[in-house]
Image (cartoon, coloured by chain):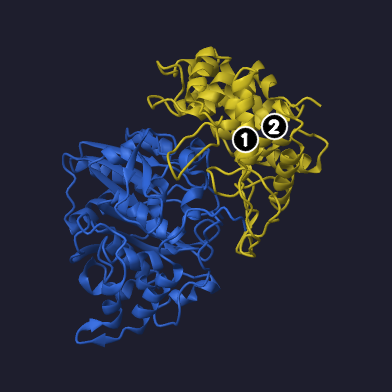
Amino acid sequence: MSDERPLHRPMSRRRFLIRGAEVGLGLTAAGLTVGGILALQRPRPWDPNAFPPPGKARVAILKVSGYSGDLEQAVKEGLKAIGAEVKGLSVLLKPNMVEFDRASVINTDPRLVAATVAAMKRLGARVVTVAEGPGHRRDTQYVASSSGLLDLLHDVDTPFVDLNVAAVARRQLRTSYTQLGELWLPLPVLEADLVVSMPKMKTHHWGGVTLSLKNMFGVVPGRIYGWPKNVLHWAGLQQSIVDVAAAVQPRLAIVDGIVGMEGDGPIKGTPIAAGHLIFGTDPVAVDATAAFLMGVDPMRVEYLSEASRFLGQGDLGQITQVGEALDRSVTPFRLRPELQGLRPGTAGASPHGDPAHAAGG
Amino acid sequence: MPTDPRARLRSLRNPDGGYPPVAGAPSEPEPTALAAIALDDGSARDWLGNAQRHDGGFILGPDALRNDVATPLAALALAPGSASDRAIDYLVAHRAPTLGNDPRFPHDPATRGWGWTSKTFGWVEPTARGLLALQVLRPAAGEAITDAKRLLADRECSGGGWNYGNRQVLGTNLEPYLQTTAAALMGLQDPSDQLVIRGFEVIDRLWPNEQGGLGLSMALAAVRLNGQERPKLGVALQSLVDRTELLDDCVSLSWAAIALGPSIQKLRVNR
């Protein structure tokens, strides 16, 4: 190891693990968990003026068995169920198009993306844009065209923006889980009235699960931060997820859980028919719900546990689920052996340690 | 009438003489350097001259984040002389730190190359660029060149070709990509090297199925720089340019112009 150290990580993995253990113990003391007491004493790496305490949240779980049905209608129903309002807004849809493999299900299905465009327009959105900065491919044209996304967007008369090359502006971070301090973010993202995170429901070999918060990595331009978003991994994957999500703050999330990816995700896993779309205006609540549906305890996912302290509601008891019943909708996703600790009721959390320098795969 | 990527690229030049990463964005070092090479554009070279820092590097990103990955391309784009020499001096002096071995992503910890940003360890595309610039402009930089070749050899995927940097993560072999494999082959430029031979086997396998502007352009450039011919690859690239103008991505258009035109000679390693 060189003496020349990379950007430091102020929030140690040990501190993350303490949080996981606290939640796992689930002890109470006069109505307040032991973890809660300790949480009050821990540093708060966020600006409290920028992030009011999370309140109650509402998440819709819709049963959708495939991509060939009326997805536009399903999206409209989901948006209505959570009371999302898009009329008059400039909307930027951010799907997960990280890579393309014809034989796999890595990406948010382009048919769902196009259907969401149509639904947004039908509901009065002023303008809708689809944008992504693929993390595993520098050749965005290859990913966007081979996946069929460009043709489908042409059919709904909607532009695609490559966030890896779009003009950028500098933004100071209001969180400090990493020591990045600031991020250069694409103007189309910063200027949109509403950023919609549209992840694929997948396992992630470093982070446990990848959902709407992790999906925000695609917003960070590769030409500045390297491929595959090299600097973010170097700064600490879990910490970067929280910092980036807090910087972008998507106000709507739609998870493509119709067919997800289990096992060695986010790239090398295998398809699993989970049969759901998940909607919410609080991305932390959406991710907590989606993780639960995958058979994962959301509070054992390190970045999700941290994000639930300030960025959104991660406590399933504070989230009103509408549509399908939460408990009856679980489809346990197969996890790598090292990630079994993410299952509810098991001991310990993810044992990989911080991937810091791995950046890829 | 085929679309000339040079003409399309020239139309995207900003009033300040530089080139943006994509139409309408401010000028940046990487697209400007590549366009200067592709078009032999004096205004682009002037823009680069003004963007060069006192230390010789070209930085995109402030303060703690110093992305200097365009420096080797700028060195190749600048006219021979002081500015280009200073860029090469910077390149030699700013290699990435090494990283201790880790069974989660095995690699030879002794290898040194270049990273995307300062203080991150060496990756395939930045290292290939650095290697290319040194082999063309300063072949006497023996240690840095040898180290870069060792890094590329170490990071080769199982069966040939290159991913971004790692060849294996958590026990899973990573797949080679067309664009990163092409970058490595441009840097190596040694058709007799088994690494290069295996790399072209990967190129031949991937390009018919990876119809993207950047990948096809860099693949064709790698083919020509290694003294090979792939006529069908050239046809496929020209067809994509005709149909899509490569989405007005200046880096892709520049590589297409280089791959399809005479300016590729500026990237050729003399042996």
Is label 2 on the same chain as label 1? yes
Q: Which residue is mark 1?
A: B91
Q: CA distance from mark 2 to mark 1?
A: 9 Å
The x and y percentages for residue A143 are 50, 41
A77 lies above or below B48: below
Q: Amino acid at mark 1?
A: Leu
Q: Which residue is mark 2?
A: B134
Instruction: State which mark lies toward you, 2 or 1.
Output: 1
Asked if residue B236 can be seen in this view, the reply is no
Mark linked to residue A5: none
Q: Colour of chain A?
A: blue
| Residue at x-position 41% and y-position 45% | A220
**Figure quadrant of residue A304:** bottom left
Q: Quadrant of the N terminus of chain A?
A: bottom right
The x and y percentages for residue B86 are 61, 27
In front of the other: A116 or A39: A39
